[in-house]
Amino acid sequence: MSKKSFRHEIVESMREIIFGLEDSLVSTLGAITGIAVGAHSTYIVILSGLVLIAAEGMSMAAGSYLSSKSAEQAEDVFHKRKRGREKVRPVRSAVVMGVFYFAGGFIPLAPYFYLSVDDALAPSVIFTALSLFALGVWAAHYTKRSKFKSGMEMAGVSLAAALVGYLIGRAVASYFGVDVV
């Protein structure tokens, strides 16, 4: 069995790293932004953010484990895996997905620990946007795409998805007559 380079290990886990970080950044930002504009409560935002990160992080790790294991088993059955061929590692996939999901979720949530709901909203969005851009740039390092285009694509597509949470929070708050940010 040959030793793999760190770069090779990263490339093997690229899907889980990017998916875990991007999904965590976007879903956490979308949810807590919607909750922040709808509830105006630091306690509710932080509680919701922590519950979301924990539940979704475990769900993403479990999903990564189960899907990787199923893919591995299907490949074994249908393709009669050749000896020496690289196997999918379900436990590794789950751990990488979970770790990066948990880490990413705290980026949009962090400002709410230090600032009021109204003051935390902009830094939360800005830190998340910068993190998404950096993730796209980092991915381009391995894919040999344009770093700027990759960063912009990651940030743009992801923030468009997170905007949905904000719009729902505003709509529900407006429906119930709550002043919105």
Image: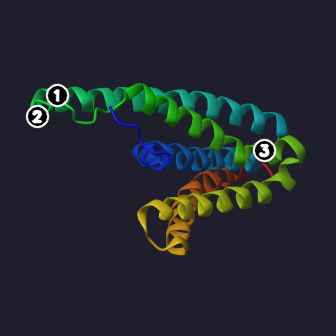
In the rendered structure, the answer to whether residue 35 lies left or right of residue 91 reads right
How far separated are the C-alphas under marks 1 and 2?
A: 6 Å
Q: Nearer the viewer, mark 3 or mark 2?
A: 2
* Residue 117, x across and y down, in percent: 84, 48
Q: Nearer the viewer, residue 32 or 91?
A: 91
Mark linked to residue 110: 3
Q: Amino acid at mark 2?
A: His
> Which of the two labelled residues, at mark 3 and mark 1, occupies the earlier sequence position?
1
**Marks 3 and 2 in Cβ contact (< 8 Å):** no
Q: What residue is shown at x 43% (from left), y 68% (from top)?
A: 144
* Residue under pointer 2: 79
Mark linked to residue 22: none
* Residue under pointer 1: 76
* Residue 141, x across and y down, in percent: 50, 63
In the rendered structure, the answer to whether residue 63 lies left or right of residue 157 reads left
In the rendered structure, the answer to whether residue 17 lies left or right of residue 63 reads right
Residue 176 can be seen in this image: no
Q: Amino acid at mark 3?
A: Ala
Q: What residue is shown at x 44% (from left), y 30% (from top)?
A: 92
The relative height of residue 166 versus residue 152 in the rendered view (above or below) is above
The relative height of residue 77 versus residue 7 in the rendered view (above or below) is above
> Which of the two labelled residues, at mark 3 and mark 2, occupies the earlier sequence position?
2
The relative height of residue 138 versus residue 25 in the rendered view (above or below) is below
* Residue 170, x across and y down, in percent: 68, 54
How far separated are the C-alphas under marks 3 and 2?
A: 47 Å
Q: Quadrant of the C terminus?
A: bottom right
On the image, which quarter does residue 106 sit in? Answer: top right
Q: Amino acid at mark 1?
A: Asp
Q: What residue is shown at x 27% (from left), y 36% (from top)?
A: 86
In the rendered structure, the answer to whether residue 156 lies left or right of residue 120 reads left
Q: Nearer the viewer, residue 171 or 161?
A: 161
Q: Nearer the viewer, residue 151 or 159?
A: 151
